[in-house]
Amino acid sequence: MKMPAFPESFLWGASTSSYQIEGAAAEDGRAPSIWDTFCRLKGRVNNGDSGDVACDHYHRMPEDVRLMKDLGLAAYRFSIAWPRLLPRGRGAVNQPGLDFYDRLIDALLENGIEPWPCLFHWDLPQALDDLGGWSNRDMAGWFADYALLCARRYGDRVKHWATVNEFSVFTLFGYAWGWGAPSISDKAFHLKTIHHVNLAHGAAVDVLADQIKGAEIGAIHSWQPLRPQKQTPEDIAAAALFNEHWNLAFPDAQILGHYPPLIARDIEPYVQAGDMARICRPLQWFGVNHYAPMYGGADANMLWGFGWGEVPAELPRSGVGWPMQPEAFKDTLLELTRRYRLPVYVTENGYGSEDKGGRAAEIDDQERLAYLQSYIAAMAEALKAGADVRGYFAWSLLDNFEWGAGYGTRFGIVHVDYPTQERTVKASGKWYSQLIKNKKRGLTRTSTSGPETGA
Ligand code: FCB
């Protein structure tokens, strides 16, 4: 398979997030986040896993940056742990926490890798949750203060900023269905959370733009085409509401300045005069995390009456059962370009596998390699068809703590042997690295048949 050219300026990177890789959960002044609390609840995370140690990245950061350099990454997307910088979520600053990201940013720049931090990838300081968390409207101001701290400290070196990762996923899982931290399932709480997270995003955008000359600010959204599982009126209606919640609630508010119609009706009691203008602030890019199309249907047992339906049997599935359909990725990129008219960066895309205990098999990850090949090829087709895609970050640089699935699910292009913390580049990582290096050397057409070809 030959792959069409990507523009020379196309940015190739990889992504991680703080709670999923850092570990050092109780070190150097970091205070608990809601995920530390959640992991301690019995039976909520597979195998009782937690992010206490994770990939020990907090201590192994220099080695991990060398690894990124060896892979040839041009950019690295990570998140800043709010409870490491502000253990109470606001007020007193924790110097060692600030210093850690200074060291990380400097190491990246020394190695020619662009830092792409995200301010919030779900590890909310527990102290703020104790004050009502996202149901408290004051969260917008607290988030803006945290953004100000980051902007002042890192803004001299960091130009690309994301406010929040996957607004819809953490709010639905954490506040509607109770499957993730902080394990709440309540309609009013969920609606307030949607609105307050949007307000926090808008406030942070203003702070970053005001503080950092030439800042390139974006937000990161999970976007998976949502199809009704059956063509019945019930499933069609359920899938439409699911689509508003999953795909539209946040980017429509932030970029188009209004909520989608069904949510607009429900959320009205929480919207104050001037709020939509506070939320809809100028952005320079759109971050999309895409994995798989979703099939929605009516489900009376779920809080909002929608849930996951059956996936058509003919669709192949990833190692964690997610349907694989590269054309859905192509469609997504085209649709985002049409709908929001911003340059798009793919901030996550990748393949999950259940660890069956075979290290050798995990490292020779031909399925992940094939997934990346076909999805990157679909991205090239989207580009050709007019999608304004500027970069791609593989999820994930490292195998890591996969939330409720713990360490049993792996997404890395680099294998992590947790007992020894040894890192081994997988077949998929070697292929991806070769792709990037060929592009950098100006080889516009790259064979996708294996890591050693096409050089
Ligand atoms: C996304 C999350 C990321 C990771 C991947 C597999 O929803 O942003 O942290 O868990 O899924």
Image (tube, helix red, strand yellow):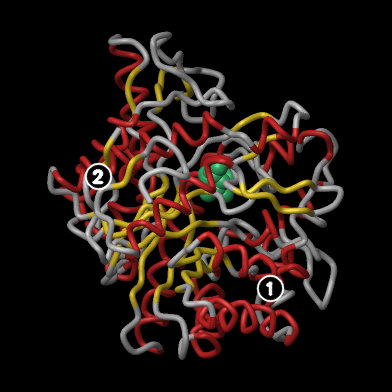
Q: Give residue 293's mark.
A: none
Picture layout, residue 325 above or below residue 338 = above
Res 148 visible = yes
Picture layout, residue 211 above or below residue 146 = below
Q: Is residue 297 left or right of residue 77?
A: left
Report the residue at 46% width, 45% height from top. 452
Residue 401 position in % (x across, y down)? 70, 47
Q: Nearer the viewer, residue 441 or 15?
A: 441
Residue 229 position in % (x across, y down)? 37, 15
User: How dense is the environment of label 2, judged by Cα within 10 Å: few (below 14), some, or many (20 and up)?
Assistant: some
Picture quadrant where residue 324 is located: top left
Q: Nearer the viewer, residue 40 or 425?
A: 425
Q: Is residue 246 left or right of residue 178?
A: left
Q: CA distance from mark 1 to mark 2?
A: 33 Å
Q: Amino acid at mark 1?
A: Pro
Residue 130 position in % (x across, y down)? 72, 62
Residue 1 position in % (x across, y down)? 30, 32
Label 1 sits on residue: 62
User: How dense is the environment of label 1, judged by Cα within 10 Å: few (below 14), some, or many (20 and up)?
Assistant: some
Report the residue at 48% width, 18% height from top. 299
Report the residue at 75% width, 83% height from top. 96
Q: Is residue 431 left or right of residue 319?
A: left
Q: Give residue 380's mark.
A: 2
Q: Amino acid at mark 2?
A: Ala
Q: Are marks 1 and 2 in contact (CB under 8 Å)?
A: no
Query: Which one is earlier in the sequence, the residue at label 1 or at label 2?
Result: 1
